[in-house]
Amino acid sequence: MAARLGMDVAAPHMKKGQRPKLKDHLVQWSRNARPRKSGRELLAAVRGIQAGFDRRPDRREGGA
């Protein structure tokens, strides 16, 4: 249902004569659909996310 909604939202913004495809709006749950990452790549991603949280100005210091 969400994929169909995505198609309907995208349709008016496409070039004339083109139609959105349902498969372009479906979530792929297959492990083969995305490449595997090494441990170092995963660690780098986590460190990047953590750095983003550390830079946020609204962080509370001291807990609570």
Image: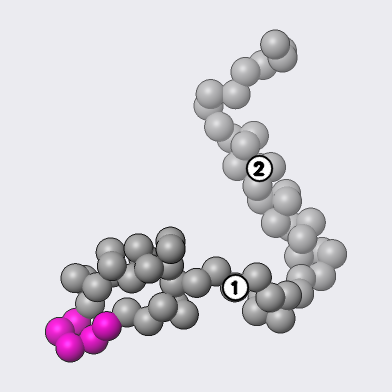
Farthest front residue? 1
Looking at the image, the residue that sits furthest to the left is 16
Please report contact status of discs 1 and 2: CB closer than 8 Å, yes or no: no
* Pointer 1 residue: 28
Q: Which residues are magenta?
A: 15-19
Q: Which residue is mark 2?
A: 51
Query: Which amino acid type is shown beneath numbered disc 1?
Result: Gln
Q: Residues within 10 Å of mark 1 (few under 14, many from 20)?
A: few
Q: Residue at x 67, y 16 (%)?
A: 61
| Quadrant (top left/top right/bottom left/bottom right) for the C terminus | top right
The kind of secondary structure element at disc 1 is: loop
Residue 43 in which image quadrant? bottom right
Q: Is residue 19 above or below residue 52?
A: below
Q: Is residue 14 left or right of residue 58?
A: left
From the viewer's perspective, is the residue at label 1 or at label 2 nearer?
1
- Whether residue 31 is visible, yes or no, is yes
User: Residue 4, relative to residue 63: is it above or below?
Assistant: below
Would you identify the image quadrant in which residue 63 lies? top right
Residue lying farthest to the bottom in this orientation: 17
Q: Measured from the top left, where is residue 50 in percent x and y? A: 69, 42
Quarter of the rendering containing residue 40: bottom right
